[in-house]
Structures are given as C-alpha cells and as structure tokens.
Image (spheres, coloured by chain):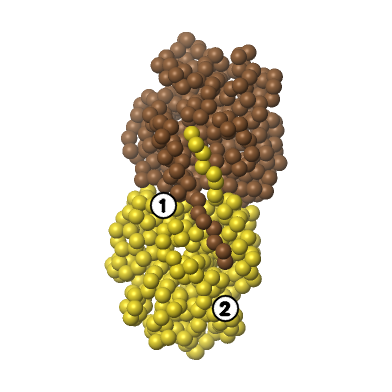
Chain colours: A yellow, B brown
Amino acid sequence: MSLITVGTMAFDAIETPFGKVDKIIGGSATYVAWAASNFYQPIKQVSIVGGDFPSEEFDQLAARGVAFEGVEIVKEGKSFFWSGKYHLDMNNRDTLVTDLNVLEQFNPQMPESYQDCEYLMLGNLSPAIQQSVINQLRNRPKLIVMDTMNFWMDIALDDLKATLKMVDVLVVNDAEARQLSEEFSLVKAAKKIMAMGPKYLVVKKGEHGALLFHEDKIFSAPALPLEVVFDPTGAGDTFAGGFIGHIARTGDISFENMKTAIIVGSAMASFCVEKFGPERMKEISKEDIAMRMQAFAELANFETATV
Amino acid sequence: MSLITVGTMAFDAIETPFGKVDKIIGGSATYVAWAASNFYQPIKQVSIVGGDFPSEEFDQLAARGVAFEGVEIVKEGKSFFWSGKYHLDMNNRDTLVTDLNVLEQFNPQMPESYQDCEYLMLGNLSPAIQQSVINQLRNRPKLIVMDTMNFWMDIALDDLKATLKMVDVLVVNDAEARQLSEEFSLVKAAKKIMAMGPKYLVVKKGEHGALLFHEDKIFSAPALPLEVVFDPTGAGDTFAGGFIGHIARTGDISFENMKTAIIVGSAMASFCVEKFGPERMKEISKEDIAMRMQAFAELANFETATV
C-alpha cells in the first residue's frame, strides 16, 4: 500500500521581511513528501518537471522512501517557477511571477505500480487533473484529501464542484472557504461545503491555526506563536503532508485521530516557516517532531472546571 | 474577602447586521459583574451613573451578590452613552457616539467596606483612575487584572506605563498589544509588555480566540466557532469577568489554573454574543455554563501522537 501525492515540483523565488532567495526548490508535492515521509513510506509522487530540476533533490527524497515513477521529466522543458513577496503580515502575499512552463502540459498518467494507493493527497492543481488522477485508480483509496485555491473557484467552478463530490477531505484557507460557500460564518461555510461532497473540511487560518469540521463536530487547532515567521512558503502543503502522513501511519480515519493529524500538520508547518523553502524540513529529526508535538499539547490542552 | 470591579455602567445603542437596539444597558463593570457573579460573590462595583440608570438593573445584580456602595449616583446627571455599528467582520466596529456625561467627573472613592479586596478587575478607564483605585487599597490585592485600550496609548502613555508596573495581568486585544509594544510578532510583543510590569499578558483575538503569556509559557485558547455572532458588545468585558471570576472562586493564581480561567472567560464571551447587550448573560444557568465548558474541551483538547 502507498501514499500518493499529486502536485508541483518547482523552483521558487521568495522575498520576506527577513531575507530573499532567488531560486530554491518548491512545489506542493515536494513539501507534502518532505512532511509525510517522517510518518509513512513509501510515498509515490505524481508531478512534472523540466530537465533543469536537480537530480540531488530526487536523491534526497528517494532516501526518504519517495518514488518518482509517476513524475514526468520533460528534458527540453523548464520546471514550474513561482516568485512571491511577503509583507510583515505573513497571511498575505503578492505573487510576482508565475511561469507555468512544463506544468502547461501536465497530464498525469498513473503507473501500474501506483495502483496500490491507500491514501491520496491531491495538491492544488486544476480540478480536471485532480479528477483524472482519481479516475485512473482502479480501487478507491481509503482516504482522498484535496487542496484547492480561489483561482479554480474563479475559472473552473463546475469542474471543482464535480471533483469535490469524489473526495473525503477538503483543505482550504478561510478566505477560500468563504468564497466557495458564499457564507461569512465559517460554521455556515463548512455546512455548505460538506454538502458539496467532502465529509471533512479543514480550514487553514495561518497564524490563527486551523479548524476541522465533520458533521456537527468542530476541532480548533492553534498555530504555534512564533517570534519570527521567516518564510511561510510551503507551510500549507507541509501541513497537508503532516496531516495525511499521520493518518497513513496510524491507518485510523476517525474524527478523533484527525484531530491529532491536524496537530501533526500544524507542528510540521511550524518547522517549515523557520527557514527558506523546504530547508528546515530537510533538517528536522523525529526527536524534534516529538518535542514540537509536546509544545502543541502544552499550548492547547487545559483542564476543564466545575462551575 | 471580595472581588472589586471598576468600570463603566452605561447605556449603549448598537447596530449589527442582525438587528438594532436604541438603548440597552452596557458598560464594562456591568458585563464583568454579570459574568463573574456566576463564580464568586460578593462582587463590589466601583462606577458612576446618572439619575437615569434604572434601579431594576441594580436590583438584578444585587440579587447576584453585587454590591454598589462604591457606585456614585449623580442624580441630575446622565449615564455614559456609547453607540456603535458592527459590520459582517465583527472584529471591527465603528463608534458613532461617545457621550461621557457623568463619566467626565469620575473620581472613584473606595468605601471602607471595599478594603477586603482580594481580586481587583480594573476595567478600561483612564490609567490615572486605575492607579488611584490601586493606591486607595491599604492591602495589595492577591491579583490585579487590568484592561486598557489604544486610546490611552495615544493620549496617556506615561500614565499607562506607570499603572502597568502595579498590575499582575494585562488584558488587551492583538492590535493593542502590537501598538503598546511596537512589535508585530505577538511573542515579541508579549515579552516587551511583560517587561513593563505585568507578569501575565492576555491577548484577545476575537473570533480567533485568545493567548495567555507568562514567562516563556504560552497558552492558546480557541473561540467557539459560531453560526451567528449576534452582537459582540461586551464580549471582552464578559471574558475578563469569567477569567477573574474563576480565579477568585478557586483562589489559585497558577499558570495552569489561568489556562482554565481563559477558557471560562471564552465560554462566557461565547454566550454574551448570542443576544444584544447583557441579555443572554441574565438568562444562562450553571448547567448552561458547564455544557459550554464541555464544548470547549471537545473543541480544543486532543490526544498527542508518538512519531
């Protein structure tokens, strides 16, 4: 059995109030793989890159149990490139450049070796591509988690709604949840979105943490308050990677275990923002993760009171 | 021993997306008393009102163990009046009218019967008045909690800083913490503010919950996600009332117990916003509060994971 992650592998240029980097590895599938491989292996990647994508990046991930048979390498092409700038309020960013490059011809084909997929993480891509991946799997995965963004709500809402019917968990940020549902209250938004298909909704709120909705239940996870958010790039994908990685490791898709998965995702995201790109994700050990999980427990858990 | 709450007793006119009310009881000391009296009695009020303040409001609070010897009644004067309008994003509001009326001559005198004060809640008032109250108490209370706002940072920063040296817990919202500390990161802001005097800092974040800081420790409390925030007026004061009420009831000023106190405050605030003004606070029972505390435990507590 395996965990499949579908998404971009890319180059990013990033500017934050704390520094600047002109070319660093990025992409949603990259971040998901770095985070999830702490908890579960094998991870099978579905992506597309140009001939410029460094082989040592594949090697580093391969050493973590990540497979690349589903990654198309377009030798004469260039990898997807994104450039963005963050301000002091890291919840907002300006996109400076989006060069799709090889991503324009992305039409993923599932290799036979990927048919053992038990957990499927659909990174933010066109809903038609996300749907095509699901349709190519002969056995329905135990859990399908889907990320998306406002862009697809603007230009491909019908495709997006069709894909939503096929997934178990949708992960979006608060602005996207409001846009998709046309509701300001996140509680009302969650009800509407769950009626569109996903049984679970995760709403990411950046420095304010995340909410998990399922039926009438809600779980609120804090973000770790940090002195410096050095670079938030990839934090959302890292969160998703930690989330599905924990679920895959435990094999438990109950709401109670998803609460813990949200905390695992939040812990991984709290590492991600400490350095540029995925740098910090390459350094951390299981001991670091265990300590961070403990920090989250101290941050959020409390004794209740009699009245 | 007693819990003293110093603040306004007033009339409010409120408009929200869900309705409008032209004249309703308000004021920080009113909300603190309604919330705290669920947990601790006697509560001794320090305030000033005009001859227009309804005697039945005093009677209702008196039935809850609230004393008024420290409330000056200016028969020929009018009570403080505030009018505000909320938009769909309830974190922001427009103040339409502020008629100080009798509040302009507020110069509180502590009655002898108030000298048994063990817990002191200083509502948002001029820092000079807050300081005068502390100085009139012959025995230093076990815990002094202080609320303030950006207005005093703008016009009375030196007084504010002097008062901060005399209190244990400061309660502000996130924008105020940033303004007072001149730091964007709330972690850095908390360090600077705690260096100004208070050993504990509570940062209220509206729909995003609240943070409690003490030394190197942080606690993050969620807000209860609600379908409708009917009227947020008084939610901050109600939060403070629940917070100090729980601490007074338990007599425990440890960080661990303050975590629970933050949740009690959050639970009380979640009731407050369900109706206009203090209406909902007058209805709720101990059973309602116990159920709400349980809802917060389910909302926030989680099992940690091994890696």
Q: Which mark is residue A298?
A: none
Say whether residue B237 is visible: no
The disc, 2 or 1, on the residue closer to the chain's N-terminal end is 2
| Distance (Cα) linking label 2 and label 1 | 34 Å
Q: Which mark is residue A64?
A: 2
Q: Position of residue A231 (x, y in %)?
A: 59, 63
Other residues around mark 2 within 10 Å, as few (<14) / some (14–19) / many (≥20)? some
Q: Quadrant of the C terminus of chain B?
A: bottom right
Q: Quadrant of the N terminus of chain B?
A: top right
Q: Position of residue B141 (x, y in %)?
A: 66, 26
Q: Position of residue A20 (x, y in %)?
A: 62, 67
Q: Which residue is mark 1?
A: A218
* Badge 1: chain ID: A
Other residues around mark 1 within 10 Å, as few (<14) / some (14–19) / many (≥20)? many
| Residue found at the very far top of the displayed protein | B76
Q: Three-letter amino acid code at disc 1?
A: Ile
Circle 2 sits in a helix, a strand or a loop, which is it?
loop
Residue at the image point whose x is 50% and y is 70% from the top: A249
Circle 1 sits in a helix, a strand or a loop, which is it?
strand
Answer with left or right where residue A68 lies relative to residue B110: left
